[in-house]
Amino acid sequence: MGNEWGLEKLGNLLEITSSKRIFRSDYCESGVPFYRSKEVIERAKGNKISTELFISEDKYNEIKDKYGAPATDDLLLTSVGTLGVAYLVGEDDRFYFKDGNLTWFRSFSERLLPQYLLYWFRSNIAKRKIDEITIGSTQQALTIVSLKSLELTLPPLPEQKAIAHVLGTLDDRIELNRRMNETLEAMAQALFKSWFVDFDPVIDNGRASGKEIPAELSDRAAARAALGDKRQSLPAEIRTLFPAEFTHSTELGWIPTGWKVGTLGEIAILGNGKKSPVRTDGTIPVFGSNGIIGYCIDHNREDVIIVGRVGTYCGSLFFHNSKCWVTDNAMSAEMLEKKNNLYLLELLKTARLNDRRGGSGQPLLNQSILRSIRVLKSSNKLVSEFSSLATSFYNKLFSNEESIHKLSHLRDTLLPKLLSGELRIPEAEKMVEELAL
């Protein structure tokens, strides 16, 4: 570390404050997004907001005009419950936030770069300092007064910019891969919807052969016709797997002729997870309702869909393509033919699992609820064709996930070394370049 690096108190480098009180009665069905710690944590992780809250445009503008609102390069820090998660406000962000839950860092001194502070808060150095100032035994919290007293190592501004650039480059590449994965997931979902929900190929076959399209599907048929040459036609070997007519069913309305109405339990194997073993530094991920929660040596499932069973993430879905342990607050799901699991994943996405959960106190999904879900049963050949196409999307997605893992590992390795001055910028840049090769 150079002699020009020194310790500075945060309170001397920026303004540390909070928001104005927003009451539950101020919530609206639409308007300006309103964030609590939960939403800020989701944004900090690059995830979508799972529970949307809003305040009115008038309320937002009233507060903004009097007291200000989060602006580009301001920083929010979770300060109750889960502590110390930092989020840097982006150019396109427009929201307000809950007082007390989040602390607002703004009006930065020219000596402190907001991006540098973001990475400092992500470091173990900051986590140790936050632990020292945390108050509360039942619900932990951070106060504005204590945050002002935090001391951080402050390099000269050019060095801060260089550190933020190296780490930001890795974050940008991580975000690019995430967005690519969102696109790939959307492509698989759009294909499933076209084939098995909107029945586009059946409508196209019906129009081509002069068959009558049911009145309930006339809008969709008109939309297909309006596409003209832009409508992507399927290869003959896939197109002929779809019928050209519809039959009316009492359970699901108009369905392609020859398809049957059944239950999820007839086409899928559903199982409860098991209480997780003692977690160690193994290589097998442990999955619960809200995603990966640790590692263990043993495992009980391989290549399965994990369904959130209990709590806030009840009904959440994700597909894991290798060995894993599914805990007792989640369920596993797989097709009778494992190669068609991606078909099942998209089918479950359309089943609105969140609306099917039971439980008077805590939300709950069980096997009985899942098994009874009504589903359409098409031909095995058609399901296999979809799964094959979806697999091509997901293979790219899994490759991107591996890149994200490597990039994240390098970023987390470089972070403490750059902030402590142990590693200099040229060495870090070389490591980033080598990973790109």
Image (cartoon, grey):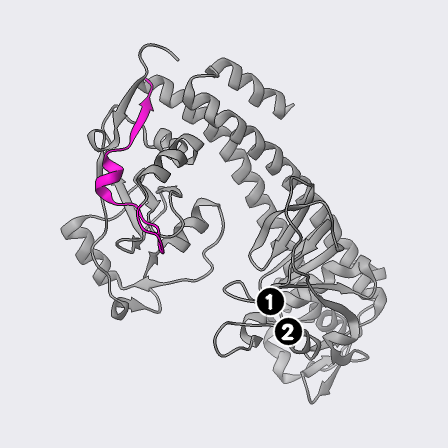
Residue 310: image x %, image y %? 56, 67
Q: The residue tagged with tag 2: helix, strand or loop?
A: loop
**Amino acid residing under circle 2:** Asn
**Amino acid residing under circle 1:** Arg
Residue 426: image x %, image y %? 50, 13
* In magenta segment, residue 306: no
Question: Which quadrant of the figure has residue 259?
Answer: bottom right
Question: If the image is split into quadrants, where does the N terminus sit?
Answer: top left
Give the magenta part as a residue range.
135-155
**Label 2 crowd bin: few (<14), some (14–19), many (20+), radius 10 Å:** some
**Residue 256 in view here:** no
- Residue assigned mark 2: 366
Closest to the observer, 369 or 157: 369
**Residue 72 in view here:** yes
**Label 1 crowd bin: few (<14), some (14–19), many (20+), radius 10 Å:** many
Question: Which quadrant of the figure has residue 389?
Answer: bottom right
Q: Disc 1 and disc 2: Cα gap in Å?
A: 7 Å
Left or right? Give the position of 400 relative to 160.
right
Question: Which quadrant of the figure has residue 187?
Answer: bottom right
Closest to the observer, 46 or 381: 46
Q: The residue tagged with tag 1: helix, strand or loop?
A: loop
- Residue assigned mark 1: 309
Q: Are marks 1 and 2 in contact (CB under 8 Å)?
A: yes
